Amino acid sequence: MARRRDVILGLAGGLATGRALAQSGPGDLPGMGPQPELPPPNTTHRVVNRSHGGGWPRGRVPKAPPGFTVTAFAEGLDNPRWVTPLPGGDVLVAEAPAANRVSLLRAPGPDGRSRGRVTILEGLNRPFGMALMGRTLFVADTDALLRFPWNDGNRITARGETLLRLPAGGYNNHWTRNILPARDGRSLFLTVGSGSNAAEHGLDNEIRRANILHVGLDGSGEQIFAAGLRNPVGLDWEPSSGALWTVVNERDNIGDDLVPDYLTRVQEGGFYGWPFSYFGQNPDPRLQGQRPDLVARAIVPDYALGPHTASLGLAFSTGRLFPDAYRGGAFIGQRGSWNRSAFSGYRVLYLPFRDSRPAGMAQDFLTGFMADPETGQTYGRPVGVAVDAAGALLVADDVSDTVWRVTPT
């Protein structure tokens, strides 16, 4: 694999509260699709419009399309951010930033709910990505890649080994570090988000950030697989081609409808624009004239997911449990906006694929998280999505402290 350390250091006012007008669906939200229309940037944009609340009323669950059932797989968690299904039906869940632990949810019983919960690890530092490979559990803290001996789904008392230190801190909770094993099982891919919105603290503070890294199973041989990705979080392998795909949170404060988050195939050695340009060669006016060489080579993402949607979760639909209309495409968890006058996101999308590429428009799959768009009251916010051993969709809802499980009725 070619080294890409030449790619930018590797990557090397007042606030106004906007009132929500309405929550947009995929059909009417601007900045959606493979060729979104992008308005001119507005560098005076300073909207802060945060949602609040959390917790579903008794008997209420997220809304799925007809023919699907939504079950509370596990409740009473503490900020469940990410879920990693295991082959036997158990599920690992990272609870952060308060609990800072990894729990194991036992495989579902006949009612679709987990049969029990075990605390696997505690005392971590904002754990997020997890991967079980053989007898080894890898966990990505915000500042380190860790390795633990697996204890067959029981509490791990052995001390973990720090394999690799990672840059930590920075802008607006870009603390998530995801892990995805390589398809051959011989290495790992790691996501590291930027430490700023648009490099306002200088590029020296962005070394090894806004990247997808590639490392050996012992943490050695770190290489920058792709750069210029402001905050890549979800990672998965497209099942037909075997290509690596990611969802990326884009930048804030240049408009209600800029910049759209996106889903894209990750090209080795590719540069995706941050911080100098967005969605290809559209220059960020706050860095006007800087690094035209990198702007010229910035890759246009495959699919825009709407502005400020906080698209985090990514899981391709595999297995045969779901009907044909929901196979082979991508489920995307959108935690929802704060830098937009009208709320966007707060849902799980399904994007159909054909011939290993997005085909058609993204569609709502799981909604109802935003209880009242006028006041910003929420029942929950979806983050991580995953397909479990049986083929059901799992959704980590970090505001209602629930992991949902969606199956055909």
Image: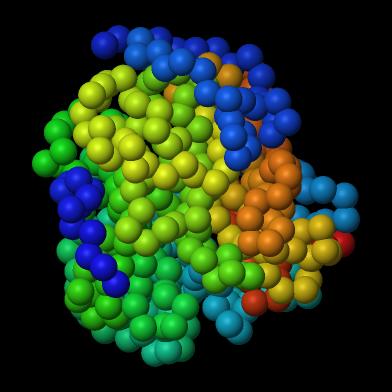
* 247, above or below 23, in the image: below
Q: Nearer the viewer, residue 301 or 77?
A: 301
Rendered position, 295 above or below 6: above
Residue 339 % position (x, y): 45, 24
Q: Write the residue at 40% across / 50% down.
A: 232
Question: Tag count in the figure?
Answer: 0
Q: Name the residue nearer the viewer: 382 or 360.
A: 360
The residue that appears at 42% across and 74% down in the rendered structure is 181
333 horizontally vs 195: left or right: right
Quick check: can you spot residue 185?
A: yes
Residue 305 is at least partly visible in this image: no
Residue 136 vertical placement versus 393 (above, below): below
Tell me residue 300's x, y (percent): 47, 42
Q: Is residue 288 above or below residue 240?
A: above
Find residue 287 and report its image quarter: top left
Position of residue 211 in the picture relative to residue 339 (left or right) = left
Residue 209 position, x and y percent, is 24, 49
Q: Is residue 287 left or right of residue 392?
A: left
